[in-house]
């Protein structure tokens, strides 16, 4: 996880455009994330910050433009172990109970070969990831027994288990109380100190604010601001763009919607 | 009793026991992943589709087992595609195939001129009519199934618990989902001769539900489900054989009912264990603001007083009637 000065940028988006259901959501995105940088993606609901993260991680295809990860075009990128992804409000509970350790261990999948058992190195990385997020004493507890904030930390540990160079988090602090946000910020602080590159989608920075190197504010699918994070204490909080939120992809339940009837 | 023991020397009974053992191992192994993905009824959907496969076999004179495998795999892939592509829920996709499969099967069996009795062998299983070839077929499929599910456990677990995370981790999620669907289809056809197509899903789901009552990790659930599956399959077969001296007792339903009985008996234990664990888990350490002393307290708390003693920081709180009482010198504090 060490940073060399001339290492390729972990994320480069050029002229990026993403469409969902034929409707362009993101347009003309140019974004470079430097090695070791802690970048916060901010913006109102529907501004496209989560969409951008999903495009960077390949969950959504680009309609135009290009994404490259660690200097490799997305189509040729195979070093998935270099990326750790924490999805938005993931469904941590599933039909079958699983322990915190099992969920975190599933993050090690990026570095494991099929049909082979966990190596000692794997186990060490998993234990380390659980310790970084401060759940060391809860590893054998069922994940559904944890509070929302602790579940979120377990999901971050899962992303860390693969020892990624780039960590991408989609609203990890949403619906998490202040104490857990602090624990989350502490964990991210440790990673930043180790030289990891972090891209974080957030509504509010809260305790993470001092860690942020650069804030990028999205508005209606475009980058509206890129620069130092402006704290709420500056008196003018630019991160929360004004204006109403709106659907980029209107829901069409039936083709005959709007032909009278109903409203 | 001697009649019962002499059953074991009958070749058909030996074949039936081996087939039951294999089914009891295989069905819960794949069933755990289906339950985890909240697709508990997938096995049922595939089972209904396989009815059409059996009917095609009866119509064309090909082996109904093989036609059932082919049609079940196609059906499983179709369910997966509808689930993934259409914005239909998984359960709607299942329902569509349920009805199509069953209606097609009954219709084609009629056209083939076969009676309901022939179809019934496949619908409710006929362990006693299994040939040596069938046993080898079942054995081969079970080995393939166990090697794949247990060998790819980390991958399948990651895909089933969080598909988006798995995709960014570089796994081919669609391929793994298809693999689970195909393995489920293979299991259905393996279990077809034991418990029958209409009851096959029970052997995939009920052992998992039983194991879940007592397990809290995925791995224990999976192992427990396989143990329960084997016990139910072998026990049900023996029970039906023992009872068959008095009445007509089919093995398939006996196996399923035994599995359900195991679930019914572990359920209260699970409820009790969960309640107990919740009751006795430590109270959080919070800085107290005041020191409240109880009023007159005639009862003396102690290790054997019967009130739950819950750890709280460096002492224990005794819980009763909505109070948390901690010993403090000569009196009790309200915590």
Image (spheres, coloured by chain):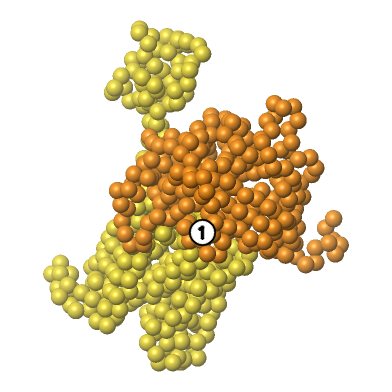
**Secondary structure at numbered mark 1:** helix
The residue that appears at 59% across and 47% down in the rendered structure is A33
Depth check: A68 or B199 in front? Answer: A68
The residue that appears at 34% across and 44% down in the rendered structure is A124
Depth check: B241 or B228 in front? Answer: B228
Say which colour chain A has.
orange
Q: Which chain is yellow?
A: B
The residue that appears at 35% across and 8% down in the rendered structure is B329
As drawn, the residue found furthest toward the right would be: A260
The residue that mark 1 highlights is: B167
In the rendered view, would you say A91 is above or below B14? above
* Disc 1: host chain: B
Q: Residue B269: horizontal and vertical position, in percent?
A: 35, 44
Q: Residue B51: horizontal and vertical position, in percent?
A: 46, 79
Please identify the quarter of the rendering in which residue B91 is found.
Answer: bottom right
Depth check: A203 or A223 in front? Answer: A223
Badge 1: how crowded within 10 Å, few (<14), some, or many (20+)? some
Q: Is residue A150 visible?
A: no
């Amino acid at each position: 996880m060490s940073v060399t000065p001339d290492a390729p940028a972990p994320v480069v988006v050029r002229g990026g455009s993403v469409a969902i259901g034929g409707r362009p959501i993101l347009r003309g995105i140019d974004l470079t994330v430097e090695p070791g940088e802690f970048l916060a993606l901010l913006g109102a609901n529907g501004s496209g910050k989560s969409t951008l993260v999903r495009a960077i991680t390949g969950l959504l295809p680009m309609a135009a433009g290009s994404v490259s990860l660690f200097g490799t075009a997305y189509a040729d990128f195979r070093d998935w172990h270099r990326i750790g992804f924490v999805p938005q409000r993931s469904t941590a509970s599933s039909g079958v109970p699983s322990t915190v350790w099992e969920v975190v261990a599933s993050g090690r999948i990026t570095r494991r070969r099929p049909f082979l058992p966990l190596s000692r190195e794997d186990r060490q990385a998993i234990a380390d990831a659980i310790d970084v997020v401060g759940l060391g004493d809860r590893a054998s507890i069922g994940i559904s027994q944890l509070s929302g904030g602790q579940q979120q930390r377990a999901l971050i540990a899962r992303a860390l288990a693969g020892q990624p160079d780039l960590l991408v988090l989609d609203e990890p602090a949403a619906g998490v109380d202040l104490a857990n946000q602090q624990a989350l910020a502490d964990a991210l602080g440790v990673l930043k100190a180790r030289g990891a590159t972090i891209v974080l989608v957030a509504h509010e920075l809260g305790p993470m604010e001092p860690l942020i190197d650069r804030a990028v504010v999205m508005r209606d699918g475009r980058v509206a601001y890129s620069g130092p994070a402006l704290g709420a204490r500056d008196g003018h909080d630019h991160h929360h763009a004004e204006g109403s939120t709106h659907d980029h992809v209107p829901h069409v339940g039936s083709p005959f919607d709007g032909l009278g009837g109903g409203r | 009793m001697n009649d019962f023991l002499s059953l074991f020397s009958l070749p058909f009974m030996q074949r039936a026991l081996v087939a039951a053992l294999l089914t009891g191992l295989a069905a819960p192994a794949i069933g755990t992943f289906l339950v985890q993905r909240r697709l508990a009824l997938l096995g049922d959907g595939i089972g209904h589709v396989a009815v059409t496969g059996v009917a095609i076999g009866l119509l064309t004179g090909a082996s109904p087992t093989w036609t059932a495998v082919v049609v079940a795999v196609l059906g499983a892939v179709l369910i997966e595609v509808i689930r993934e592509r259409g914005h239909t829920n998984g359960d709607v996709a299942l329902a569509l195939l349920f009805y199509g499969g069953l209606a097609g099967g009954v219709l084609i069996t009629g056209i083939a001129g076969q009676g309901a009795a022939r179809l019934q062998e496949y619908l409710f299983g006929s362990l006693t009519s299994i040939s040596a070839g069938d046993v080898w077929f079942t054995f081969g499929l079970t080995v393939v199934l166990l090697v794949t599910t247990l060998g790819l456990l980390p991958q399948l677990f990651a895909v089933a618990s969080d598909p988006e995370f798995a995709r960014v981790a570089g796994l081919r999620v669609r391929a793994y989902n298809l693999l689970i669907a195909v393995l489920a289809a293979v299991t259905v056809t393996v279990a077809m001769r034991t418990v029958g197509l209409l009851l096959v899903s029970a052997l995939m789901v009920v052992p998992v539900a039983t194991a879940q009552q007592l397990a809290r990790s995925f791995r224990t659930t999976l192992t427990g489900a396989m143990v329960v599956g084997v016990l139910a399959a072998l026990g049900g077969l023996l029970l039906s054989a023992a009872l068959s001296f008095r009445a007509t007792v089919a093995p398939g339903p006996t196996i399923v009912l035994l599995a359900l009985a195991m679930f019914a008996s572990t359920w209260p234990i699970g409820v009790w264990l969960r309640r107990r664990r919740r009751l006795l888990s430590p109270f959080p350490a919070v800085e107290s603001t005041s020191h409240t002393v109880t009023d007159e307290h005639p009862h003396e708390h102690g290790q054997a007083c019967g009130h739950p003693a819950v750890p709280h920081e460096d002492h224990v709180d005794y819980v009763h009637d909505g109070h948390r009482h901690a010993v403090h010198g000569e009196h009790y504090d309200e915590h």
